[in-house]
Image: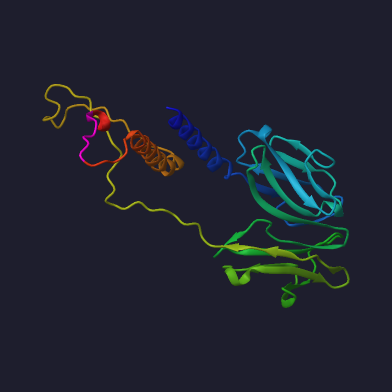
Amino acid sequence: MGEVSVLWLLFLTSLLIYTTNQVRLTVNPNSSQFFKEKSLSLSCEGAENSAGWTLRRSTLEGKSHCGETWGRWSNSSCKISMTLPWDSGAYWCESREGAISNMVNLTVTGGSVILQSPVLPVMEGDDVTLLCKTKTTPSNLPAAFYKDGVFIGSETTGHMTIQHVSRSDEGLYKCDISGHGESPSSWITVTGNPITTVLPTSTPPPPTFTSLTPGSASHPDAPSLQLEFRLPFHLLVFCPYFIATVLMVSLCRRRAKAPPTCTGQKLPDDLFD
């Protein structure tokens, strides 16, 4: 039974890993660039146990976590009340077990112009809006936009919308407002549509159990009790592997008990019990 206990432990661990990998880091406001002395909040969405997670970052100052020398951690979120240029860097959520979320890159500038663009990857086919913004009022001034250092157009209100983005739109973007300056550059990532698994139409329905009463098998109007079983997706994925592993271990144990092969010797009758 020792091998079975170990297999159960591995099975439960795999379910834990599957769950923790669903944690996602989000940023509010949704932008990859910020002016200094502004506030922002970073949340680890999907972290059911906030005590087991923290927000970490890697900057020019080194690696650290929220609440150490910066930010305030509460309910799976980290709030930075006053951003400074040395807050620029890579951020991610991390559990005590070492599981990590997606990573985002944030830039805090002391300049007068920023480019507000999606901090998370955007899906192919979606529309993406870029906003070139100044620190002074009014903020929506005419701006020129660049991708990978190449001019791609100008807008009188500082807004540029890229319709139905594709992988070719992925790249490094920045903007410029005459008389105010140029923004830092930010990378925009474009991802493909998620794969949706569609079950065949011939797939049998979930098993049902009907209460058996005299005559109920032949009477179409007889009352029945139907129980449906719906398993989470990750159980449907891992259970077949777990069962196959148990069968392999059981087979190996039986082979280990078998005596060396020899000619003319009868095998014990209880070998296959």
Task: Give the quarter of the image for residue 216.
Answer: top left
Question: Is 66 contained in the magenta span?
Answer: no
From the viewer's perspective, tell me whether residue 201 is left or right of residue 130: left
Q: Which residues are magenta?
A: 264-269
Looking at the rendering, in which quadrant would you find the C terminus?
top left
| Image position, residue 31 (x, y; %) | 72, 56
Question: Is 267 contained in the magenta span?
Answer: yes
Task: Give the quarter of the image for residue 56.
Answer: top right
Task: Give the quarter of the image for residue 219.
Answer: top left
| Image position, residue 83 (x, y; %) | 84, 49
Task: Report the front residue among 212 and 242.
Answer: 242
| Image position, residue 160 (x, y; %) | 69, 68
Q: Residue at x 13, y 21 (%)?
A: 214
Task: Report the front residue among 78 and 249.
Answer: 249
Name the chief secondary structure element in magenta.
loop
Q: Residue at x 55, y 64 (%)?
A: 124
| Numbered label tally | 0
| Image position, residue 46 (x, y; %) | 60, 41
Looking at the rendering, in which quadrant would you find the N terminus?
top left
Q: Residue at x 26, y 27 (%)?
A: 225
**Picture colour scheme:** rainbow
Q: Residue at x 58, y 69 (%)?
A: 167
Depicted 249 relative to depicted 224: above or below: below
Residue at the farthest top position = 214
Depicted 52 relative to depicted 86: above or below: above
